[in-house]
Amino acid sequence: MIEQKINTSFFIADLDELSTDEQMLVEKAQNILKTSYSSYSGFSVGASVLLDNGVTVEGSNQENVAYPSGLCAERVALFYTGAQYPNSTIKTIAISALSKSFEIKDYISPCGACRQVMAEYEEKQNAKIKVLLHSPNDKVLISNSVEDLLPFVFRSPFLKRF
């Protein structure tokens, strides 16, 4: 048996240390929280995506009483981006969260399904996506690639038989 380790890299910054575009993206992620339909969990998530053409797309989580019929904020924003801007490259995604039932004190990381979708967009566009995870104390965890959040990503070649 051989032990192997995976290293991941990320940065922690104050919100005011980010570029103007990144600060605006975090602000949009916070603002879109208002449109979250999270009446069952009380856990609102907002995501905003910056494209290479300067367009930003926002999404919020949308729940449904018939779990798991809802959709996370990240996937709402990414799927809309894929449908409306199929030839654009996603540069950055910012994610923010708010809970009605408890105080969030740290960064909220995307769920596994969202990480997989983000990783597939990274693979599809053949370009890294910067991830900004905003915490309530205005600290931001910055990852320069989705792969740092999901090191054992499931890739499409595994499905190809020929």
Image (cartoon, rainbow, N blue to C red):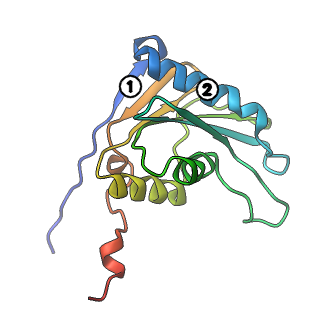
Residue 12: give its label: 1
Name the spot of residue 98 as percent of width and height, x first.
70, 33
Q: Residues within 10 Å of mark 1 (few under 14, many from 20)?
A: some
Q: Amino acid at mark 2?
A: Lys
Q: Amino acid at mark 1?
A: Ile
Name the spot of residue 54 as percent of width and height, x first.
46, 28
- Return the residue nearer the eye: 17 or 57: 57
Location of residue 9 by image quarter: top left
Name the spot of residue 134 as percent of width and height, x first.
53, 29
Residue under the image location 43 percent in, 33 percent down: 53
Location of residue 97 by image quarter: top right
Q: Residues within 10 Å of mark 2 (few under 14, many from 20)?
A: many
105 left or right of 161? Answer: right
* Residue extending furthest toward the top: 16
- Count up the numbered dots: 2
Quadrant including the N terminus:
bottom left
Q: Marks 2 and 1, how far apart in space? A: 20 Å
Q: Secondary structure at mark 1?
A: strand
**Relative to 24, does residue 133 appear above or below in the rendering?**
below
Quadrant including the C terminus:
bottom left
Name the spot of residue 112 as percent of width and height, x first.
51, 58
